[in-house]
Amino acid sequence: MDVLSDVIALMRSGRPRSARVAWHGPWAQRFPSVPGSAGFQVILRGSCWLIPPSGDPVALGVGDVVFFPHGHGYVLADSPSATPAEPVCDPLEDAELFVSDFVGGHGPVTVTLCGGYRLDPRHSHPLLRDLPEAIHLPARFGHHPELRAAVDLLGNEIGNPRPGADIIVLALLDMLLLYILRAWFDEPPERARATGWAAALADPPVSAALHAVHRDPAHPWTVQTLAAEAGLSRAAFSRRFTALVGQPPLTYLTWWRLTSAAGLLRASDAPLGEVAGRVGYTSEFAFANAFKREYGIAPGRYRREAVIGGADGPAAPAARRTNR
């Protein structure tokens, strides 16, 4: 798997939810801050304003996508000076995978498509931690056609559900999340993105090493062999990787191996020795020691608590709500 796919696969927990909402003016809606979640808003019809906790309001039009990777709160409204109401629409609190609703009075209509994702806070990857509070992807002709296609398909499925809609909506929500992140990372570098994971993925040598680690974490990687993947000398590679990723190569390798192991423990009943081998440890004892240093508990206990805690894993909050 590639880096972005790996990160999302391990961080996601539970099922996402989505809603198509028709807002009839006048309207203003507050979406609360909810750690451990991420979400999006897409404007399908009309226009509105995004009012962040700090900074100026942002005008949104048809086709605009806003992604909230850290669950920070915000307000959507038909006017930048409107007084917001308390939350009434929360996809992750609904039992259904997707819902349609309408809110407000009898004025002009704005239709939004919102979605929420649960993220496991125990496995937060720096790739997502580096993202800003909100990512605004304006609708521009010819830009990100796959993202626009996924938005259209998802809006149609929710607005007019037919047999098989549950499977289709789940797949489209996953696709949309990846297309949003891909669109962000594909944008030309800006000053705020000159370092960190956006820069690391855009840097061919460092990106090659990261993909090698994610492709085969069990391989006996060394700084020298990773430098060879990157096409750099050992010293030059180590400096470059550390500067962009924020960790030395072998520190990141160890962290990713143990993060992958935690995912395997939650998702499978494979013996601990097999899990150890799949992430690059030659003995179950060495793996157990490394895992306990990282997570504070033995891998067997971690697995048992993950089963008790359900999809959110051990020590996860009992309930969460998310922004869209």
Image: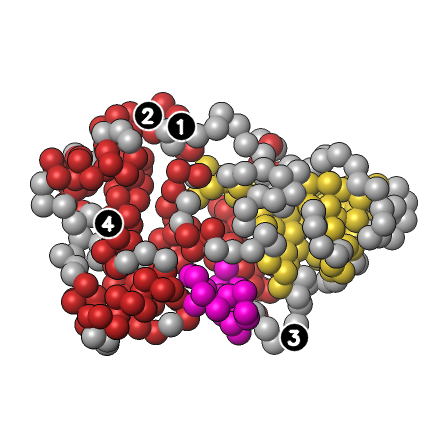
Determine which of the numbered discs, if any, sits on residue 254 in the image: 4
Query: Is 149 on the left-hand or right-hand side of 81?
Result: left
Using the numbered discs, state the Cα–Cα distance from disc 3 to disc 1 in whole angstroms. 45 Å
Range of magenta residues: 181-199
Q: Which residue is mark 1?
A: 315
| 187 falls in the magenta region | yes
Query: Circle 2: is it few (<14), some (14-19), or many (20+) Cα within 10 Å?
Result: some
Mark 4 and mark 1 lie on one chain; the one further toward the N terminus is: 4
Q: Decide if residue 18 is in sight here.
A: no
Query: Circle 3: is it few (<14), some (14-19), or many (20+) Cα within 10 Å?
Result: few
Label total for image: 4
Q: Residue at x 48, y 55 (%)?
A: 130
| 19 falls in the magenta region | no
In the displayed orientation, state which residue is furthest to the top. 308
Using the numbered discs, state the Cα–Cα distance from disc 3 to disc 4 in whole angstroms. 43 Å
The x, y position of residue 5, in whole percent, is: 38, 56
**Which tag is nearer the camera, tag 2 or tag 4?**
4
Q: Quadrant of the N terminus?
A: bottom left
Q: Amino acid at mark 4?
A: Thr
Element assignment for label 1: loop
Q: Nearer the viewer, residue 225 or 102?
A: 225
Q: Which residue is mark 3?
A: 141
Using the numbered discs, state the Cα–Cα distance from disc 1 to disc 2 in whole angstroms. 8 Å
**Which tag is nearer the camera, tag 3 or tag 2?**
2
Using the numbered discs, state the Cα–Cα distance from disc 4 to disc 1 in whole angstroms. 22 Å
Q: Which residue is mark 2?
A: 305
